[in-house]
Amino acid sequence: MGIEKHIIRVQEPHSKKRKFFISSKHLYRLLQTDISYKTFVETNIVWSRLRENIDYHFNEQHDTYNLSICAVQAILILENTEKSWQFFNELTDLINNGFNRS
């Protein structure tokens, strides 16, 4: 399954604008890493240089982090696996095509 199926459009709590996000839980499952979800979140989101309420925000309703498309790209590069680069390229193609999923 491609990364485009996991892109959601939600209202970002800080600016109240609707933006594209991917859930940290969905990204974790897509990447199939050998670390726990807790470690994935701590190293790639909480302890990283990503900016809270700009690059990501916590979604209490679903107990997950909503990651901006830019944050997802950064995490995919940091993961540096075949699968992460595959998803990075898919995401780049989506961006270059204006998120037109056809």
Image (cartoon, rainbow, N blue to C red):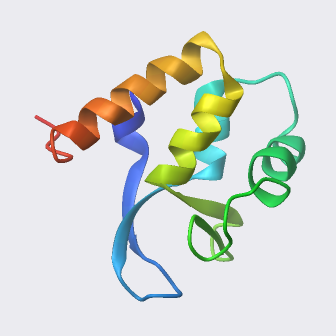
Q: Nearer the viewer, residue 38 or 68?
A: 68
Residue visible at 83% across and 22% down in the picture: 34
Residue 52, visible in the rendered structure: yes
| Percent x, y of residue 16 | 41, 88
Q: How many numbered discs, if any?
A: 0
Q: Nearer the viewer, residue 25 or 92?
A: 92
User: In the image, is residue 48 above or below residue 63?
Assistant: above
Residue visible at 71% across and 66% down in the picture: 63
| Percent x, y of residue 83 | 56, 16
User: In the image, is residue 49 above or below residue 27?
Assistant: below
**Left/right of residue 18 with respect to residue 78 in the rendered view:** left
* Quadrant location of the N terminus in the rendered image: top left
Q: Residue furthest top?
A: 82
| Percent x, y of residue 73 | 51, 40
Residue 45 placement: quadrant: bottom right
| Percent x, y of residue 46 | 81, 60
Residue 33 placement: quadrant: top right
* Quadrant location of the C terminus in the rendered image: top left
**Left/right of residue 44 with respect to residue 59 in the rendered view:** right
Q: Residue furthest left?
A: 102
Residue 1, visible in the rendered structure: no
